[in-house]
Image (tube, rainbow, N blue to C red):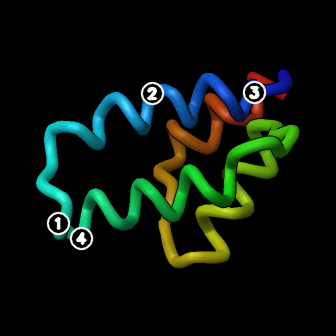
Amino acid sequence: MAINGTDIVEQLRGRMKFYHVGDPVRRDMQTACDVIEGQELTASSVADWLEARGVKLTPKQRQVLELDD
C-alpha cells in the first residue's frame, strides 16, 4: 500500500501547532516532515526507516505493516 507523503506531512504539521517553537518534539516533527515530503513510501519502507533509527516495533505493529503491503 502506498502512503501519500503529503497526507502524513499535513497531519504532522497539524500536530506541530500544539508544541511551542523551541520544543524538541516540534523540531523532530519538522525533521520528519522534511524527510517524508515528496517521497513515495510503503509500509515496509517506513518500518525499515524506523528500525534503522532504533525504534522497535511490537509484533502486532510489524504484522499490521506486513498486511498493508
Query: How dense is the environment of label 2, judged by Cα within 10 Å: few (below 14), some, or many (20 and up)?
Result: few
Q: Is residue 39 left or right of residue 4?
A: right
Q: Kindly identify which residue carries mark 2.
A: 11
Earlier sequence position, callout 1 versus callout 2:
2
Q: Position of residue 30 (x, y in %)?
A: 45, 57
Q: Kindly identify which residue carries mark 3.
A: 3
**Amino acid type of the residue that numbered disc 1 sits on in the rendered structure:** Asp
| 22 up-or-down from 15: above or below | below
Earlier sequence position, callout 4 versus callout 3:
3
Discs 1, 4 touching: Cβ within 8 Å: yes
Q: In which quadrant is the N terminus drawn?
A: top right
Q: Nearer the viewer, mark 1 or mark 3?
A: 1
- Disc 4 from disc 3: Cα separation: 26 Å
Q: Kindly identify which residue carries mark 1.
A: 23
| 14 up-or-down from 30: above or below | above
Query: How dense is the environment of label 4, judged by Cα within 10 Å: few (below 14), some, or many (20 and up)?
Result: few
Query: SS at mark 1?
Result: loop
Query: SS at mark 2?
Result: helix
Q: Position of residue 31 (x, y in %)?
A: 51, 64
Earlier sequence position, callout 3 versus callout 2:
3
Residue drawn at point x = 43 percent, y = 37 percent: 12
Residue drawn at point x = 69 percent, y = 63 percent: 49
Q: Kindly identify which residue carries mark 4.
A: 24
